[in-house]
Amino acid sequence: MLLISHDCTDPAWNLALDEYLLTHFTEEVLSLWRNGPSVIVGRNQNALEEIDQDFVRARGIAVVRRLTGGGAVFHDLGNVNYTLVQPYQEGDFNNYAKFTRPIVDFLAELGVRAELSGRNDLLVEGRKCSGNAQAVRGGRILHHGTLLFSADLSQLAGALRPRDIKIQSKGVKSVSSRVTNLAGHLPEPMRVEAFLDRLRAWFLARPGVRPYQLTAEDRAAVDALRAAKYGAWAWNFGASPRYTWARAAKYPFGLVDVRLRVEGGVIQEAVLYGDYFGRRDSGELAAALAGLPHRREAVGEPLRALPLGDYIAGMEPEELLDLLCG
Protein backbone atom coordinates (compact mmCIF):
# COMPACT_ATOMS: atom_id res chain seq x y z
CA MET A 1 0.00 0.00 0.00
CA LEU A 2 1.20 3.51 -0.84
CA LEU A 3 0.94 6.12 1.94
CA ILE A 4 0.55 9.71 0.74
CA SER A 5 1.04 12.61 3.12
CA HIS A 6 1.02 16.24 2.03
CA ASP A 7 0.50 19.70 3.48
CA CYS A 8 -2.18 21.08 1.15
CA THR A 9 -5.21 22.31 3.10
CA ASP A 10 -7.30 23.49 0.14
CA PRO A 11 -10.51 21.40 0.33
CA ALA A 12 -11.20 21.59 -3.41
CA TRP A 13 -7.70 20.32 -4.19
CA ASN A 14 -7.86 17.56 -1.61
CA LEU A 15 -11.19 16.28 -2.91
CA ALA A 16 -9.83 16.42 -6.45
CA LEU A 17 -6.90 14.31 -5.23
CA ASP A 18 -9.36 11.75 -3.84
CA GLU A 19 -10.96 11.33 -7.27
CA TYR A 20 -7.55 11.23 -8.97
CA LEU A 21 -6.38 8.45 -6.65
CA LEU A 22 -9.55 6.49 -7.34
CA THR A 23 -9.35 6.78 -11.11
CA HIS A 24 -5.62 6.85 -11.88
CA PHE A 25 -3.84 4.57 -9.41
CA THR A 26 -3.75 0.79 -9.62
CA GLU A 27 -2.09 0.05 -6.28
CA GLU A 28 -3.78 0.34 -2.90
CA VAL A 29 -3.43 3.89 -1.63
CA LEU A 30 -3.84 5.60 1.74
CA SER A 31 -3.89 9.38 1.93
CA LEU A 32 -3.78 11.46 5.13
CA TRP A 33 -4.79 15.10 4.85
CA ARG A 34 -6.36 18.14 6.48
CA ASN A 35 -8.59 20.92 5.17
CA GLY A 36 -8.91 24.55 6.08
CA PRO A 37 -12.32 25.67 7.37
CA SER A 38 -14.89 24.17 5.00
CA VAL A 39 -18.21 22.42 4.69
CA ILE A 40 -17.92 19.22 2.67
CA VAL A 41 -21.27 18.34 1.13
CA GLY A 42 -22.37 14.84 0.13
CA ARG A 43 -22.72 14.00 -3.55
CA ASN A 44 -26.53 13.83 -3.45
CA GLN A 45 -27.22 16.81 -1.22
CA ASN A 46 -28.58 20.27 -1.88
CA ALA A 47 -25.62 22.38 -0.77
CA LEU A 48 -27.76 25.42 0.11
CA GLU A 49 -29.93 23.35 2.42
CA GLU A 50 -26.99 22.18 4.50
CA ILE A 51 -25.33 25.49 5.36
CA ASP A 52 -25.97 28.81 7.02
CA GLN A 53 -24.98 30.96 4.06
CA ASP A 54 -24.46 34.15 6.07
CA PHE A 55 -22.22 32.32 8.54
CA VAL A 56 -19.98 30.63 5.97
CA ARG A 57 -19.77 33.73 3.77
CA ALA A 58 -18.80 36.03 6.66
CA ARG A 59 -16.07 33.64 7.81
CA GLY A 60 -14.73 32.63 4.42
CA ILE A 61 -15.66 28.98 4.95
CA ALA A 62 -15.44 27.05 1.68
CA VAL A 63 -18.30 24.82 0.53
CA VAL A 64 -17.19 21.87 -1.62
CA ARG A 65 -19.08 18.83 -2.87
CA ARG A 66 -17.34 15.46 -2.62
CA LEU A 67 -17.76 12.47 -4.94
CA THR A 68 -19.24 10.25 -2.19
CA GLY A 69 -22.72 10.22 -0.71
CA GLY A 70 -23.76 10.82 2.88
CA GLY A 71 -24.21 14.02 4.84
CA ALA A 72 -22.45 17.36 5.13
CA VAL A 73 -19.47 17.61 7.50
CA PHE A 74 -17.38 20.50 8.80
CA HIS A 75 -13.59 20.45 8.38
CA ASP A 76 -10.87 22.62 9.80
CA LEU A 77 -7.23 22.11 10.73
CA GLY A 78 -8.30 20.31 13.89
CA ASN A 79 -9.87 17.60 11.76
CA VAL A 80 -7.74 14.79 10.28
CA ASN A 81 -9.00 13.01 7.17
CA TYR A 82 -8.02 9.68 5.69
CA THR A 83 -8.71 8.15 2.28
CA LEU A 84 -8.32 4.47 1.39
CA VAL A 85 -8.45 3.32 -2.24
CA GLN A 86 -8.17 -0.33 -3.23
CA PRO A 87 -9.58 -2.90 -5.66
CA TYR A 88 -13.28 -3.49 -5.10
CA GLN A 89 -14.38 -6.86 -3.76
CA GLU A 90 -17.94 -8.11 -3.60
CA GLY A 91 -19.54 -6.86 -0.41
CA ASP A 92 -17.12 -3.97 0.16
CA PHE A 93 -19.63 -1.18 -0.49
CA ASN A 94 -21.32 -0.13 2.76
CA ASN A 95 -19.02 -2.47 4.69
CA TYR A 96 -17.90 0.30 7.00
CA ALA A 97 -16.74 -2.13 9.68
CA LYS A 98 -14.00 -3.39 7.35
CA PHE A 99 -12.63 0.02 6.41
CA THR A 100 -12.87 1.68 9.81
CA ARG A 101 -11.23 -1.24 11.67
CA PRO A 102 -7.68 0.15 11.26
CA ILE A 103 -8.79 3.49 12.69
CA VAL A 104 -10.53 1.80 15.63
CA ASP A 105 -7.37 -0.21 16.30
CA PHE A 106 -5.16 2.88 16.12
CA LEU A 107 -7.37 4.82 18.53
CA ALA A 108 -7.35 1.87 20.92
CA GLU A 109 -3.55 2.06 21.07
CA LEU A 110 -3.92 5.70 22.09
CA GLY A 111 -6.29 4.70 24.86
CA VAL A 112 -9.52 5.74 23.12
CA ARG A 113 -12.31 3.20 22.66
CA ALA A 114 -14.22 3.93 19.45
CA GLU A 115 -17.02 1.87 17.96
CA LEU A 116 -18.92 1.81 14.70
CA SER A 117 -22.50 2.97 15.17
CA GLY A 118 -25.40 3.09 12.78
CA ARG A 119 -24.46 3.19 9.14
CA ASN A 120 -21.13 4.97 8.91
CA ASP A 121 -20.14 6.81 12.11
CA LEU A 122 -17.52 6.12 14.75
CA LEU A 123 -18.55 7.04 18.28
CA VAL A 124 -16.59 7.65 21.46
CA GLU A 125 -18.65 7.57 24.64
CA GLY A 126 -21.81 7.85 22.57
CA ARG A 127 -20.70 10.88 20.56
CA LYS A 128 -19.65 11.06 16.94
CA CYS A 129 -15.95 11.56 16.24
CA SER A 130 -15.82 10.26 12.66
CA GLY A 131 -18.09 10.17 9.63
CA ASN A 132 -17.32 7.96 6.64
CA ALA A 133 -18.42 7.60 3.02
CA GLN A 134 -17.60 5.50 -0.05
CA ALA A 135 -17.62 5.49 -3.84
CA VAL A 136 -16.94 2.78 -6.42
CA ARG A 137 -15.48 3.48 -9.87
CA GLY A 138 -13.99 1.14 -12.46
CA GLY A 139 -13.46 -1.83 -10.18
CA ARG A 140 -11.98 0.23 -7.33
CA ILE A 141 -13.47 1.50 -4.08
CA LEU A 142 -12.70 4.72 -2.26
CA HIS A 143 -13.42 5.00 1.45
CA HIS A 144 -12.75 8.27 3.21
CA GLY A 145 -13.48 9.49 6.69
CA THR A 146 -13.08 12.32 9.14
CA LEU A 147 -11.45 12.26 12.55
CA LEU A 148 -12.53 15.16 14.74
CA PHE A 149 -9.50 15.79 16.91
CA SER A 150 -9.53 19.42 18.02
CA ALA A 151 -12.02 20.99 15.62
CA ASP A 152 -13.72 24.28 16.48
CA LEU A 153 -17.14 22.88 17.38
CA SER A 154 -18.69 26.35 17.55
CA GLN A 155 -17.77 26.88 13.90
CA LEU A 156 -19.15 23.43 13.10
CA ALA A 157 -22.49 24.24 14.72
CA GLY A 158 -22.74 27.62 13.01
CA ALA A 159 -21.73 26.51 9.53
CA LEU A 160 -24.04 23.48 9.43
CA ARG A 161 -27.06 25.16 10.96
CA PRO A 162 -29.33 26.30 8.11
CA ARG A 163 -31.09 29.61 8.51
CA ASP A 164 -34.84 29.81 8.92
CA ILE A 165 -35.58 29.15 5.27
CA LYS A 166 -37.99 26.88 3.48
CA ILE A 167 -36.33 24.65 0.89
CA GLN A 168 -38.07 21.61 -0.51
CA SER A 169 -35.43 19.40 -2.04
CA LYS A 170 -34.98 15.92 -3.41
CA GLY A 171 -31.49 15.87 -1.93
CA VAL A 172 -30.37 13.77 1.02
CA LYS A 173 -30.45 15.71 4.27
CA SER A 174 -27.79 15.44 6.96
CA VAL A 175 -28.71 13.90 10.28
CA SER A 176 -27.78 15.93 13.34
CA SER A 177 -25.54 14.08 15.80
CA ARG A 178 -23.80 14.95 19.01
CA VAL A 179 -20.12 15.27 18.25
CA THR A 180 -16.92 15.18 20.24
CA ASN A 181 -13.23 15.88 19.74
CA LEU A 182 -10.85 12.98 20.24
CA ALA A 183 -8.38 15.23 22.05
CA GLY A 184 -10.71 15.35 25.02
CA HIS A 185 -10.65 11.57 25.40
CA LEU A 186 -6.88 10.97 25.33
CA PRO A 187 -5.10 9.94 28.53
CA GLU A 188 -2.55 12.72 27.94
CA PRO A 189 -2.72 16.01 25.99
CA MET A 190 -1.65 15.92 22.34
CA ARG A 191 -1.66 18.45 19.51
CA VAL A 192 -3.32 17.61 16.21
CA GLU A 193 0.03 17.63 14.39
CA ALA A 194 1.38 14.99 16.78
CA PHE A 195 -1.80 12.95 16.33
CA LEU A 196 -1.35 13.05 12.56
CA ASP A 197 2.31 12.02 12.91
CA ARG A 198 1.32 9.12 15.15
CA LEU A 199 -1.32 7.98 12.68
CA ARG A 200 1.17 8.15 9.80
CA ALA A 201 3.79 6.20 11.75
CA TRP A 202 1.22 3.59 12.81
CA PHE A 203 0.30 2.84 9.21
CA LEU A 204 3.93 2.84 8.02
CA ALA A 205 4.70 0.20 10.65
CA ARG A 206 2.21 -2.17 9.03
CA PRO A 207 3.55 -4.75 6.55
CA GLY A 208 3.59 -3.63 2.92
CA VAL A 209 2.95 0.07 3.57
CA ARG A 210 5.48 2.47 2.07
CA PRO A 211 5.54 6.25 1.59
CA TYR A 212 4.74 7.82 -1.76
CA GLN A 213 5.48 11.38 -2.85
CA LEU A 214 3.11 12.93 -5.37
CA THR A 215 4.95 13.65 -8.61
CA ALA A 216 4.79 16.85 -10.62
CA GLU A 217 2.56 15.01 -13.08
CA ASP A 218 0.25 13.92 -10.25
CA ARG A 219 -0.05 17.45 -8.94
CA ALA A 220 -0.67 18.93 -12.39
CA ALA A 221 -3.48 16.46 -13.00
CA VAL A 222 -5.05 17.25 -9.63
CA ASP A 223 -4.70 21.00 -10.31
CA ALA A 224 -6.61 20.54 -13.56
CA LEU A 225 -9.35 18.49 -11.91
CA ARG A 226 -9.68 21.07 -9.17
CA ALA A 227 -10.06 23.89 -11.67
CA ALA A 228 -12.54 22.02 -13.86
CA LYS A 229 -14.67 20.47 -11.13
CA TYR A 230 -14.08 20.78 -7.40
CA GLY A 231 -13.30 24.47 -7.46
CA ALA A 232 -16.24 25.29 -9.73
CA TRP A 233 -19.67 26.56 -8.73
CA ALA A 234 -21.27 24.23 -11.27
CA TRP A 235 -20.16 21.20 -9.23
CA ASN A 236 -20.44 22.54 -5.72
CA PHE A 237 -23.84 24.21 -6.09
CA GLY A 238 -25.07 23.63 -9.64
CA ALA A 239 -24.98 19.87 -9.15
CA SER A 240 -27.55 20.10 -6.35
CA PRO A 241 -30.80 18.20 -6.96
CA ARG A 242 -33.72 20.31 -8.14
CA TYR A 243 -35.40 22.23 -5.35
CA THR A 244 -37.84 24.97 -4.53
CA TRP A 245 -36.81 27.99 -2.49
CA ALA A 246 -39.24 30.04 -0.41
CA ARG A 247 -38.38 32.98 1.77
CA ALA A 248 -40.33 35.97 3.07
CA ALA A 249 -39.68 39.07 5.18
CA LYS A 250 -41.68 42.01 6.47
CA TYR A 251 -40.38 45.51 5.74
CA PRO A 252 -41.74 49.01 6.48
CA PHE A 253 -43.03 49.09 2.91
CA GLY A 254 -44.73 45.71 3.10
CA LEU A 255 -44.34 41.93 3.03
CA VAL A 256 -42.22 40.36 0.26
CA ASP A 257 -42.48 36.62 -0.35
CA VAL A 258 -40.09 34.99 -2.86
CA ARG A 259 -40.61 31.55 -4.44
CA LEU A 260 -38.09 29.97 -6.81
CA ARG A 261 -37.94 26.70 -8.73
CA VAL A 262 -34.32 25.72 -9.32
CA GLU A 263 -32.89 22.92 -11.46
CA GLY A 264 -29.24 22.34 -12.20
CA GLY A 265 -28.44 25.33 -10.02
CA VAL A 266 -30.34 27.64 -12.40
CA ILE A 267 -33.55 29.53 -11.61
CA GLN A 268 -36.25 28.10 -13.85
CA GLU A 269 -39.15 30.09 -12.48
CA ALA A 270 -39.59 32.92 -9.96
CA VAL A 271 -42.76 34.24 -8.35
CA LEU A 272 -43.09 37.26 -6.04
CA TYR A 273 -45.95 37.68 -3.58
CA GLY A 274 -46.69 40.32 -0.95
CA ASP A 275 -48.63 43.41 0.05
CA TYR A 276 -46.06 45.85 -1.30
CA PHE A 277 -46.76 48.62 -3.82
CA GLY A 278 -45.14 49.26 -7.18
CA ARG A 279 -46.02 51.19 -10.29
CA ARG A 280 -44.89 48.36 -12.56
CA ASP A 281 -45.94 44.70 -12.56
CA SER A 282 -43.52 42.73 -10.37
CA GLY A 283 -44.13 39.77 -12.68
CA GLU A 284 -41.68 41.48 -15.04
CA LEU A 285 -39.07 41.45 -12.27
CA ALA A 286 -39.72 37.77 -11.58
CA ALA A 287 -39.39 36.92 -15.27
CA ALA A 288 -36.00 38.65 -15.39
CA LEU A 289 -34.68 36.21 -12.80
CA ALA A 290 -35.40 33.12 -14.86
CA GLY A 291 -32.28 31.63 -16.40
CA LEU A 292 -29.87 33.07 -13.83
CA PRO A 293 -27.64 30.78 -11.73
CA HIS A 294 -28.98 30.64 -8.18
CA ARG A 295 -26.07 32.35 -6.53
CA ARG A 296 -25.74 35.84 -5.13
CA GLU A 297 -23.00 37.00 -7.47
CA ALA A 298 -24.90 35.93 -10.61
CA VAL A 299 -28.22 37.43 -9.55
CA GLY A 300 -26.80 40.63 -8.08
CA GLU A 301 -25.49 42.33 -11.23
CA PRO A 302 -28.66 42.09 -13.36
CA LEU A 303 -30.84 42.88 -10.35
CA ARG A 304 -28.95 46.11 -9.62
CA ALA A 305 -29.41 47.15 -13.25
CA LEU A 306 -33.21 47.00 -12.92
CA PRO A 307 -35.40 49.84 -11.58
CA LEU A 308 -36.26 47.79 -8.50
CA GLY A 309 -38.19 50.60 -6.83
CA ASP A 310 -40.61 50.64 -9.73
CA TYR A 311 -41.58 47.04 -8.96
CA ILE A 312 -41.37 47.06 -5.15
CA ALA A 313 -41.44 50.60 -3.84
CA GLY A 314 -38.93 51.15 -1.07
CA MET A 315 -36.93 47.95 -1.57
CA GLU A 316 -33.14 48.00 -1.96
CA PRO A 317 -31.33 45.45 -4.18
CA GLU A 318 -29.39 43.96 -1.25
CA GLU A 319 -32.64 43.34 0.63
CA LEU A 320 -34.11 41.42 -2.29
CA LEU A 321 -30.82 39.55 -2.78
CA ASP A 322 -31.03 38.37 0.82
CA LEU A 323 -34.43 36.87 0.04
CA LEU A 324 -33.43 35.40 -3.30
CA CYS A 325 -30.09 33.90 -2.36
CA GLY A 326 -29.57 34.14 1.37
Image (spheres, grey):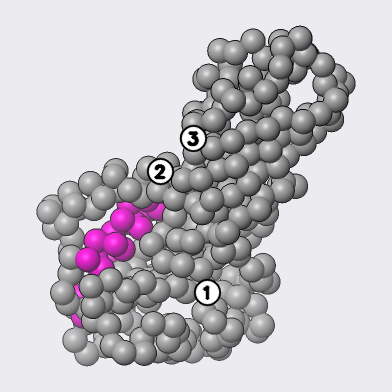
Question: Contact, CB < 8 Å: mark 3 with mark 1?
Answer: no
Q: Based on the displayed image, in which of its 4 quarters is residue 85 positioned?
A: bottom left
Q: Which amino acid does label 3 sit on?
A: Pro
Q: Residue drawn 61% across and 55% down?
A: 169
Identify which amino acid the numbered label 2 is placed on. Ala
Q: Mark 3 points at which residue?
A: 293
Q: Position of residue 183 (x, y in %)?
A: 56, 72
Q: Residue beneath label 2, please?
A: 234
Q: Position of residue 71 (x, y in %)?
A: 54, 65
Determine whether, in the image, residue 262 is placed left or right of residue 310.
Answer: left
* The one of 260 and 23 positioned closer to us in this rendering: 260
Contact (CB < 8 A) between labels 3 and 2?
Answer: no
Could one spot residue 181 in this view of the protein?
Answer: yes
Q: What element carries label 1?
A: strand
Q: Is residue 80 above or below residue 200?
A: above
Residue 313 vs 262, above or below: the answer is: above
Q: Which mark lies nearer to you, 2 or 1?
A: 2
In the picture, the disc for residue 130 is: 1
Mark 2, Cα crowd under 10 Å, few <14 / some 14-19 / many 20+, is: some
Q: In which quarter of the image is the N terminus?
A: bottom left
| Sequence-first disc among 2 and 1 | 1
Give residue 147's mark.
none
Q: Nearer the viewer, residue 49 or 292?
A: 292
Whole-angstrom CA distance, mark 2 to mark 1, is 28 Å
Q: Of the residues under marks 3 and 1, which one precedes in the sequence? A: 1
Residue found 80% across the figure and 33% down from its top:
249
Q: Is mark 3 on a helix, strand or loop?
A: loop
Q: Give the range drawn in magenta.
A: 1-23
Q: Tell me whether the residue at label 2 lies in contact with that at label 1, contact meaning CB atoms closer than 8 angstroms.
A: no
The span from disc 3 to disc 1 (Cα, nearest Å) is 34 Å
Residue 190 position within the rendered picture, expressed as x and y whole percent measured from the top left: 50, 71
> Mark 1 belongs to which amino acid?
Ser
